[in-house]
Image: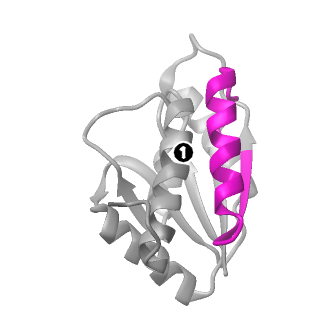
Amino acid sequence: MLHLTIVAVGKIKEEYLRQGIAEYQKRLTPYTKLKIIELPDAPLGRDPGEARREEGKRIRSVLKPRSFVAVCDRQGKKLTSEGFAQWLADREKGGQEVYMVIGGASGLAPEVTAEAADRLSFSDLTFPHQLFRLLLLEQIYRGFKILRGEPYHW
């Protein structure tokens, strides 16, 4: 079973997002050992570069050595839903703990991106990081449903 940790900068403030995230966490229990680490974001109004560096230090402090780290980055590789399902299958076969990193409002520190084993893009669009956490969980769920040949994707 895949051990997957989502590292996300910023607190989820909206109740509807918290409910959606909780629903997908529940749906994912048969497929993966999922953990979400929520890190504080840098205060708004700070220099974006300084905010990224501060958040980058926090992110790097929770990543375990020898784990597989993928960052969610608009500049990353784009996959179809089936391609992402295969990506999950490959990670599961690899046997490493997988970290998927979602940056904060100012983006990801270059150090975090540079050290990542993979960069994945889910769209050319920029999403609010709070909303993206829900979207990522839904795509992970969709990926496992595809892999198991279970109805949902179609």
Queried whether the magenta region covers residue 52, the answer comes back as no
Instruction: Please name whichever residue, 21 or 66, is drawn nearer the observer in this view of the structure.
Output: 21
What segment carries the magenta color? 9-37
Q: Is the residue 64 above or below the residue 8 in the image?
A: below
Q: Position of residue 147 (x, y in %)?
A: 44, 77
Instruction: Please name whichever residue, 29 or 1, is drawn nearer the observer in this view of the structure.
Output: 29
Q: Which amino acid type is shown beneath numbered disc 1?
A: Ile
Disc 1 element: strand
Q: Position of residue 137 (x, y in %)?
A: 55, 51
Q: Is residue 111 visible?
A: no
The residue carrying mark 1 is 102
Q: Position of residue 23 (x, y in %)?
A: 67, 45
Q: Residue at x 49, y 63 (%)?
A: 116
Crowdedness near tag 1: few (<14), some (14–19) or many (≥20) residues, C-alpha within 10 Å: many
Instruction: Please name whichever residue, 11 or 50, is drawn nearer the observer in this view of the structure.
Output: 11
Which image quarter is the C terminus in? bottom left
Residue found at the very far front of the displayed protein: 151
In this picture, residue 39 sits left or right of residue 109: right
Q: Residue at x 56, y 82 (%)?
A: 92
